[in-house]
Amino acid sequence: LAKTTQPISMDSYEGQEVNITCSHNNIATNDYITWYQQFPSQGPRFIIQGYKTKVTNEVASLFIPADRKSSTLSLPRVSLSDTAVYYCLVGDIRPGGGADGLTFGKGTHLIIQP
Amino acid sequence: NAGVTQTPKFRVLKTGQSMTLLCAQDMNHEYMYWYRQDPGMGLRLIHYSVGEGTTAKGEVPDGYNVSRLKKQNFLLGLESAAPSQTSVYFCASRPLSSYEQYFGPGTRLTVT
């Protein structure tokens, strides 16, 4: 499984756009990139997933450069309720792809201030 | 749908006692997972299952056993609890055709 590196923590303010970058230098051809969000005392929640270029949903955008050695989760106009831990996961999660159990790591603790 | 449920929500054990944590999902998902989360450590995978009757070891399997006798249930057992197993335990499931894991609310276990 590809090892990921994320900042331990980040701070921002309400209304700002926040970008969290994840490095995964040894990503394999069949690996996908998935991001989860976790609030205190809750289980993680899936945010977004992608393979290359850009993916956007109602919550966030995911930018993946051509070499796929990093990815950036973009949260537009954050609010206080976006304070959470964000995890980047990388692995081949197709059936039989070998990443049936992905490793979450320590994630990035995002703190949004008023 | 209830999604993923975990029983119990809280438990205190004495060292050496045994217990079983139950995870149930009503979404007909093939994959199920058990994680533990300790302060500052993120989530670490204990065991997982890719289908009924199958289990596999994750990152930190020692001291735990699992069983998946029914597709909807995934049991995590501690045969002889140790203080190092004090943690919050999360169960998750996902379907074969999706990358998204659905998590339960967690079980807070304290071993004294």
Image (tube, grey):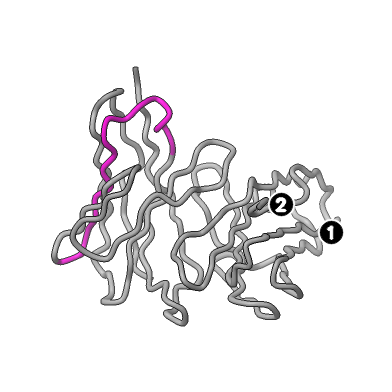
Is A20 situated above or below A26?
above
Residue B110 % position (x, y): 74, 44
Mark 2 Cα within 10 Å, few/some/many (few <14, many 20+)? many
* Mark 2 on the same chain as mark 1: yes
Which percent across, then down, holds residue A67?
A: 15, 66
Dots 2, 1 in contact, CB < 8 A: no
Residue under circle 2? B6
Q: Chain of mark 2?
A: B
Q: Which mark is residue B18?
A: 1
What's the distance in space between the residues labelled 2 and 1, CA to CA?
17 Å
Q: Which of the 4 quarters of the picture holds residue A41?
A: top right
Residue B54: % across, % down? 66, 80
Is the residue B16 above or below the residue B111 in the image? below
Q: Which residues are magenta?
A: A67-84
- Pointer 1 chain: B
Question: Which residue is rendered at x = 38% and y = 59% of the image?
Answer: A89
Going from the N terminus, do you reach mark 2 or mark 1 first? 2
